Image (tube, helix red, strand yellow):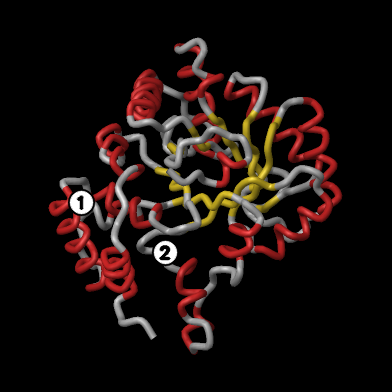
């Protein structure tokens, strides 16, 4: 089986990732973590492990840090688990507080402080991968490089990457950073087609409407940077979520997904994820659910592949119009 970029960097990651954003309850930092939250987290991790997932995605902001605390309990309940999994977290988003408005912060001190907080909440001595969460307009690449150098030298972070960045931003950072970036996490799904449309609409008027950064997909493939997809299941609109008030393209695509699932003896979730994973870039979907049934429904995605005709049928159905 073809390896994905992370594996080529020596990181033995599964192609599916469990996103832990929903662990720990709501995003109110003052609300406590309950026993039920710990049970939900434990069950979600066990379901992920059961279907071959060994990589888990966090961010310091998820449920105000409670997601990482819940995951810490899972690790403490299963001695030896930490060495068997890949842990990834993100930093750089700061919500409104007494110091300022909602903002992004890639300053050296904030990155260093954030990683210390992440490690403390997770109860681990190191992260396998640290991603910068959203581009900071005031980013100084030399500051970022200094922070990454210190984190690598101290053993707190083994690999680095970004999230929601275009190729120009990555090139600027990489110019100053010693360590090669190993991942870029972007919103890509059967519903969010920008990563395809930016190429499909070359020399077309529709290209003006696309916000996906041109050339980023190709750049990441050339530089062996793992493309990770957040929101890969498109909030369940193709796999059972009520479709009230959804456009016709969503309804028809959902019907096509269900048809393919029936023909292949697979789940709708597996079809939706397989559509992404069929792409030759080796996209790594980050599943953002802690519902154990939905996690297990994704099991077949890692081995299921669609024909070119099936893949294009879904693409054209979702875009709601013929190709140019």
In this rendering, would 259 be left or right of 23?
A: left
Q: Quadrant of the C terminus?
A: bottom left
Q: Secondary structure at mark 1?
A: loop
Q: What's the distance in space between the residues labelled 1 and 2, CA to CA?
A: 18 Å
Q: Is residue 52 above or below residue 105?
A: above
User: x, y (%) of residue 303?
Assistant: 33, 43
User: x, y (%) of residue 198?
Assistant: 51, 74
In this rendering, would 41 be left or right of 160?
A: left
Q: Quadrant of residue 98?
A: top right
**Numbered badge on residue 192:** 2
Please name the residue shown 59% across and 65% down the image.
218
Number of labels in the image equals 2
Residue labelled with disc 1: 240
**117 or 301, which is in the foreground?**
301
**Numbered badge on residue 94:** none
Q: Quadrant of residue 149?
A: top right
Please name the residue shown 72% across and 46% down the image.
180
Please name the residue shown 64% across and 25% down the image.
119
Which of the two labelled residues, at mark 1 and mark 2, occupies the earlier sequence position?
Answer: 2
Q: Is residue 203 above or below residue 27?
A: below
Q: Quadrant of residue 237?
A: bottom left
């Amino acid at each position: 089986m073809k390896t994905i970029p992370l594996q080529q960097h020596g990181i033995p990651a599964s192609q599916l990732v469990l996103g832990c954003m929903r662990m720990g309850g709501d995003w109110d930092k003052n609300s406590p973590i309950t026993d039920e939250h710990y049970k939900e987290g434990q069950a979600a991790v066990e379901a992920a492990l059961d279907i071959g997932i060994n990589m888990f995605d966090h961010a310091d902001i998820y449920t105000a840090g409670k997601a990482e605390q819940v995951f810490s309990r899972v690790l403490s309940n299963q001695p030896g688990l930490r060495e068997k999994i890949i842990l990834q977290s993100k930093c750089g988003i700061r919500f409104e507080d007494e110091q300022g408005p909602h903002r992004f912060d890639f300053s050296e001190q904030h990155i260093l402080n954030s990683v210390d907080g992440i490690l403390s909440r997770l109860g681990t001595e190191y992260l396998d991968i640290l991603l910068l969460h959203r581009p900071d307009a005031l980013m100084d690449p030399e500051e970022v490089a200094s922070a990454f150098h210190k984190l690598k030298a101290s053993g707190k972070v083994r690999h680095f990457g970004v999230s929601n960045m275009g190729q120009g931003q990555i090139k600027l950072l990489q110019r100053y950073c010693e360590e090669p970036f190993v991942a870029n996490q972007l919103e890509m799904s059967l519903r969010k087609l920008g990563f395809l449309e930016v190429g499909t609409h070359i020399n077309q008027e529709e290209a003006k409407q696309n916000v996906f950064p041109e050339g980023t997909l190709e750049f990441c493939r050339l530089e062996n940077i793992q493309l990770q997809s957040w929101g890969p299941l498109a909030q369940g609109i193709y796999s059972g979520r009520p479709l009230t008030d959804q456009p016709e393209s969503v309804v028809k695509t959902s019907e096509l997904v269900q048809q393919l699932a029936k023909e292949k003896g697979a789940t709708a979730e597996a079809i939706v994820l397989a559509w992404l994973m069929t792409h030759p870039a080796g996209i790594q979907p980050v599943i953002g659910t802690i519902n154990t049934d939905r996690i297990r429904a994704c099991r077949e995605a890692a081995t299921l592949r669609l024909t070119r005709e099936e893949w294009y049928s879904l693409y054209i159905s979702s875009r709601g119009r013929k190709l140019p």
